[in-house]
Image (cartoon, grey):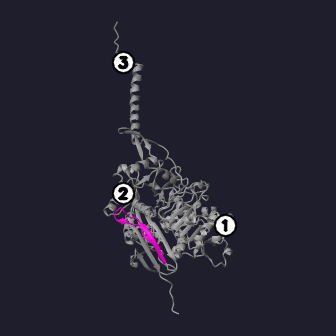
């Protein structure tokens, strides 16, 4: 019997099969884990924190020392308003007087005495102050007016009837619609037409024509909705001017914008981060989406010119060395500065100062931050928000989105100059005033977020003076006090509405008609995203046109430094009617601009009195040739450059023409 041969077979045990499977699974898991780690290292998981605290408005010291006295409500009486209409806008006279006169004095209404009024030429009483003044306080003002002083009262109440001559019951106040006539304006033609077009979002005290009809001491200067709204009354040797509408509120509505009844700002029809809108959505009126005139400035200027035309006064001119205007070029480093270096390189080579707003992210990608640059603030919900990587060596799977406070703290380490900010792409908290309160709490000195949108939509401005000014102003908070953030709006930009003739017109009028600061913004990434030859040609032509117009070309730091220098001027003037003589004592400081040139504030005063021109001007006893004088764009003011330190200027106006008997 033969034996069978068996071939041995190796049969894997269950344990060995499971072991092999585990090895394969471990390999797959390891591969997936490596891929995940690679992915999160390339795309870190980001987290962040809140933006921080909010400040509230505070009393601000008046700039310098001048001839105008502003009466203000007590800061202890400041209260949070329940609506935009309920805000006490008295503090906005700080902006109005700073822009128009440069320097003035301010006094708490409760401290008014004859001694405190002193040698003021003009006393301004805002609406909330006039509403709460007693008959005794008003009586203190009467000798001032009778002896030749000028008094401007906003929305006068019954206690002012002895001075104003008429009164309106506050219960009859209503919303205003528009200016219908301005026959008493000093300017004529196009400028007066521009004033009449000003959006007037304010309240009106309807004064009936019958109340002043036939009374020789009254003159109606301006009408709103067909009713007298600005009145002049001669009283003794002085004059009383009564505004029957809230001018400070009308100007603030244009400059700051208007929210809805729930304090929310409208959101344009574009995708924006939650809780944000754009500054360009704050427009008081859709008619100024493309504004070629600074409506807020023209309105306040025209109101005050009526007073000083009849009683000349000295004031600090808006720009250094008698310049008719200024150009400030800025660049928003969006998305990076590197692709826009051709802008700054050309400007440096041609000695054209400019300001770059860079975020922390763009600063990491390019050269170190320059001391005169600004901070491009990026909310953590927005694209390109700076991120601090978290991890070991090159492995950084986590990242902290840096909030606004952390971004400002980084900037503080880079520069000791005034901290300037700009919110990326005009992003703004949709709750009215919240962004200003956050910036104030962060210690930001100057902001430049207001202005037209680059890609305007249904609610947004396209370009121009959409906030009624190119000049700096401080926003009024809900408590009626000022937030210490100086806002300098953008006027021109490189957006889709860029048009050479429009830009040229804005700049021409800025120097020859409106006397304005034109702040332009050219983003560094524009030529990369939407390449157009006009972006480069118009950018360069702005500098050329500004030079030919005699505008002061500076950076934003330089302009802010001058604006603060302007507020340090000391000025006193007196006008003798019989002698037609204006005497001005002034003390002027000096500084240097970004290019090293000396800059000094200049003096401005009325170029004509009672229709007659200047006869003679002396500076410290030496005659000044009329050829050395400049004129404001509207022709109302004469401007003279002064040496540093104290000076005395004497201005004599020609007398009336006397015909032979």
Please state the horizontal and vertical placement of residue 378, each as a whole percent of the image: 45, 51
Please state the horizontal and vertical placement of residue 235, each as a whole percent of the image: 61, 75
Q: Is residue 224 left or right of residue 98?
A: right
Which of the image's four quarters has the N terminus?
top left
Label 2: few (<14), some (14–19) or many (≥20) C-alpha neighbours in 10 Å? many
Q: Earlier in the sequence, mark 2 or mark 3?
A: 3
Residue drawn at x 40%, y 78% as measured from the top left = 626
**Residue at the disc numbered 3:** 10
Please state the horizontal and vertical placement of residue 315, each as a whole percent of the image: 47, 69
Q: Quadrant of residue 82?
A: bottom right
Q: Is residue 15 above or below residue 483?
A: above
**Residue at the disc numbered 1:** 158
Q: Nearer the viewer, residue 59 or 285?
A: 59
Mark drawn on residue 337:
none
**Residue at the disc numbered 2:** 340
Q: For residue 509, say whether it is visible.
A: no
Cβ atoms at labels 2 and 3 below 8 Å apart: no
């Amino acid at each position: 019997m033969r034996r069978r041969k068996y071939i041995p077979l190796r049969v894997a045990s269950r344990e060995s099969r499971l072991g092999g499977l585990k090895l394969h699974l471990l390999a797959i898991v390891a591969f997936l884990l490596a891929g995940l780690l690679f992915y999160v290292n390339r795309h870190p998981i980001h987290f962040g924190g809140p933006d921080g605290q909010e400040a509230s408005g505070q009393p601000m010291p008046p700039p310098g020392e001048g001839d105008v006295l502003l009466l203000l409500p007590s800061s202890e009486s400041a209260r949070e308003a329940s609506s935009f209409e309920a805000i006490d806008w008295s503090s906005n006279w700080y902006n109005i007087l700073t822009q128009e006169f440069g320097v003035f004095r301010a006094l708490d209404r409760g401290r008014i005495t004859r001694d405190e009024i002193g040698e003021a030429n003009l006393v301004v009483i805002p609406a909330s102050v006039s509403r709460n003044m007693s008959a005794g306080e008003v009586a203190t003002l009467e000798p001032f007016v009778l002896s030749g002083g000028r008094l401007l009262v906003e929305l006068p109440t019954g206690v002012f009837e002895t001075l104003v001559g008429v009164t309106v019951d506050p219960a009859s106040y209503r919303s205003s619609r528009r200016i219908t006539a301005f026959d008493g304006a000093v300017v004529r033609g196009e400028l007066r037409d521009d004033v009449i077009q000003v959006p007037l979002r304010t309240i009106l005290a309807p004064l009936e024509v019958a109340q002043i009809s036939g009374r020789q001491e009254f003159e109606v200067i301006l009408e709103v909705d067909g009713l007298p709204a600005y009145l002049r009354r001669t009283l003794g040797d002085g004059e009383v001017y009564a505004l029957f509408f809230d001018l400070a509120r009308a100007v603030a509505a244009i400059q700051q914008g208007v929210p809805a009844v729930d304090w929310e700002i409208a959101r344009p029809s574009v995708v924006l981060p939650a809780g944000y809108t754009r500054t360009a959505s704050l427009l008081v009126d859709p008619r100024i989406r493309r504004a070629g005139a600074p409506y807020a400035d023209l309105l306040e200027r025209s109101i005050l010119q009526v007073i000083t035309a009849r009683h000349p006064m000295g004031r600090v001119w808006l720009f250094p060395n008698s310049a008719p205007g200024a150009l400030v070029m800025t660049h928003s480093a969006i998305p990076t500065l590197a692709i826009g270096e051709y802008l700054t390189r050309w400007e440096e080579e041609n000695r054209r100062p400019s300001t770059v707003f860079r975020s922390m992210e763009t600063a990491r990608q390019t050269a170190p931050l320059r001391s005169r640059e600004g901070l491009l603030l990026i909310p953590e919900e927005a694209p390109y928000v700076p991120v601090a990587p978290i991890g070991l060596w090159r492995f950084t799977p986590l990242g902290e989105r840096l909030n606004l406070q952390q971004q400002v703290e980084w900037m503080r380490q880079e520069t000791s100059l005034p901290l300037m900010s700009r919110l990326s792409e005009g992003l703004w908290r949709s709750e009215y005033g919240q962004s200003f309160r956050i910036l104030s709490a962060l210690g930001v000195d100057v902001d430049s977020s207001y202005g037209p949108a680059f890609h305007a939509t249904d609610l947004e401005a396209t370009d121009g003076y959409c906030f009624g000014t190119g000049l700096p102003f401080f926003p009024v908070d809900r408590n009626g006090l000022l937030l210490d953030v100086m806002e300098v709006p953008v006027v021109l930009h490189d957006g889709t509405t860029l048009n050479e003739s429009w830009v040229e017109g804005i700049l021409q009028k800025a120097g020859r008609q409106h006397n304005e600061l034109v702040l332009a913004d050219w983003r560094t990434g524009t030529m990369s995203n939407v390449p157009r030859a006009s972006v480069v040609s118009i950018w360069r032509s702005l500098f050329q046109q500004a030079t030919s117009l005699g505008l002061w070309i500076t950076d934003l730091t330089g302009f802010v430094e001058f604006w603060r220098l302007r507020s340090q001027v000391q000025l006193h003037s007196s006008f003798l009617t019989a002698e037609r003589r204006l005497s001005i004592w002034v003390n002027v400081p000096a500084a240097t601009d970004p290019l090293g040139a000396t800059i000094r504030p200049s003096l401005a005063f009325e170029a004509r009195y009672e229709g007659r021109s200047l006869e003679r001007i002396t500076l410290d006893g030496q005659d000044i040739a009329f050829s050395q004088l400049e004129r404001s764009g509207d022709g109302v003011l004469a401007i003279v450059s002064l040496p540093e330190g104290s000076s005395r200027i004497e201005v004599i106006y020609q007398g009336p023409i006397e015909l032979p008997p």
